[in-house]
Amino acid sequence: MRVERASFEHDYAAIRHVRFTVFVDEQRVPEDIELDERDPQCLHLLAYDDNGEPIGTGRLDVGYGGKIGRVAVLEPVRRGGIGTALMSRLHELAAESGLRSVWCNAQMTAAAFYRRLGYRAVGERFYEAGIEHVRMEREL
C-alpha cells in the first residue's frame, strides 16, 4: 500500500470511485452533495494497493482552517492501517502548509478512530447528510 498526493482534476476518477463507493453507495449520502465546490481548492491524497488500484482517499482544506474531510477507505481493506496512513500524511501536509491544528466533522461511528489519532471532540453532535457527526480537533 502506498499513499500519494493526488490532483483533483487529474485523479478525479479514482477519487470519485472511492468516495462514491463509501459515501454514496454504502452510506447513502446524496450523490449531488458528495463532490463539492471546495474540492478543487483542497489538497487530496489517494491510497493504492499493491496492484495500483485506489483503495482510500482524503482531503485537506487549508483555506478552510485545516479541515480534513472525505476520508474514505474501501470496505474490503478497512482496519488495515490505510486510514491511519492517510491521516498521518494529511497531518504532514497540514504542517507543511503552516497550520498548527486541524479539524474534522467526524461521523460518530469513526470518533474512536480520530481519538486514537489525538483528536478531541468539541461541541455538540449534529447531523450532516443524515449521519450523526461531531466536530473534532487536533494540535499538530
Image (cartoon, rainbow, N blue to C red):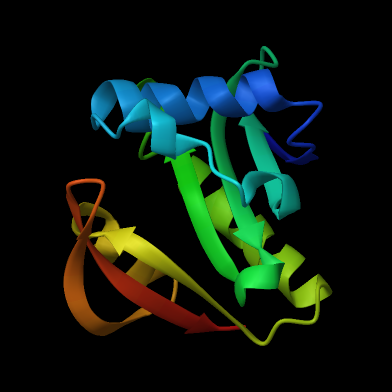
Quarter of the picture holding the N terminus: top right
Residue 116 appears in the figure? yes
Asked if 29 appears above or below 90 in the picture, the reply is above
Residue closest to the eye, 85 or 35 = 35
In this picture, residue 100 sits left or right of residue 128: right
Q: Which quadrant of the figure has residue 78?
A: top left
In this picture, residue 106 sits left or right of residue 7: left
Q: Residue at x 44, y 80 (%)?
A: 137
Residue closest to the eye, 129 or 85 = 129
The picture places residue 9, in percent across and down from the top left corner, at 78, 31
The picture places residue 26, in percent across and down from the top left corner, at 26, 25
Q: Residue at x 36, y 21 (%)?
A: 76
Quarter of the picture holding the C terminus: bottom right
In this picture, residue 59 sits left or right of residue 99: left
Asked if 45 appears above or below 95 in the picture, the reply is above
Residue closest to the eye, 128 or 23 = 128
The picture places residue 136, in percent across and down from the top left corner, at 37, 75
Residue 49 appears in the figure? no
In this picture, residue 9 sits left or right of residue 115: right
Q: Residue at x 49, y 81 (%)?
A: 138
